Image (cartoon, rainbow, N blue to C red):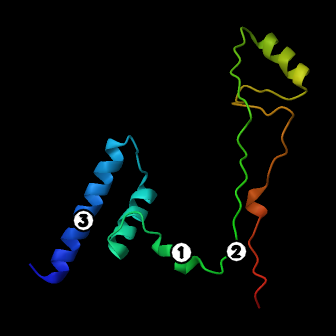
Amino acid sequence: MSALELLTFCNLWRLARALYCLSMAGKRLNGYQKQLLAESIAHTGNPNANWWDKLWQGMPEFISNDLSPWRTYLFHFEKQEDIDAFALLVNQKIGGRTKYIWYPEAEDQKLSNLRWVSTIK
């Protein structure tokens, strides 16, 4: 077995062990998380290492505000007239394809219009 084959085998073994430990702890990883874990192990041999920190130096800070609702309720309506009365009460349109509403009514966010612009020239 060559040194490269041995290194590849060791990294795969570390990845398998890390994934097994996470699964035993009840953690399920999506594909992106598995990829990050594999890259961490490949670069450092340590699944907890943040090897990308040095690559992110000088990058703009990203703040992600929590936009989840404070509380969510599930309502059941017996007939269409009940839905119409509720729509009048909350002053919102509730159609046949409406899956949820915000109260008070939330503004539609046009996120496709947002762009990141560098101030560096």
Find disc 1 in the rendering and name its residue.
Answer: 53
Placement of the C terminus among the 4 image quadrants? bottom right
* Element type where label 3 sits in the image: helix
What crowding class fits label 1: few (fewer than 14 Cα within 10 Å), some (14-19), or many (20 or more)? few
Q: Is residue 109 above or below residue 43?
A: above
Percent across and percent down for residue 48 are 41, 63
- The residue where tag 2 is placed is 60
Residue at image x 78%, y 63%?
113
Q: Is residue 76 above or below residue 110?
A: above
Q: Real-space Cα distance between discs 2 and 3?
A: 34 Å
Distance in Å between CA atoms under marks 2 and 1 = 13 Å
**Residue 103 appears in which quarter of the rendering?**
top right
Left or right, 86 with respect to 98, comes to: right
In the picture, the quarter occupied by the N terminus is bottom left
What amino acid is at disc 2? Pro
Q: Which quarter of the picture shows residue 16?
A: bottom left
Mark sitting earlier along the chain (2/3):
3
113 above or below 82? below
The residue beneath circle 3 is 12
Q: Residue at x 75, y 57 (%)?
A: 111
Residue 38 position in % (x across, y down): 35, 65
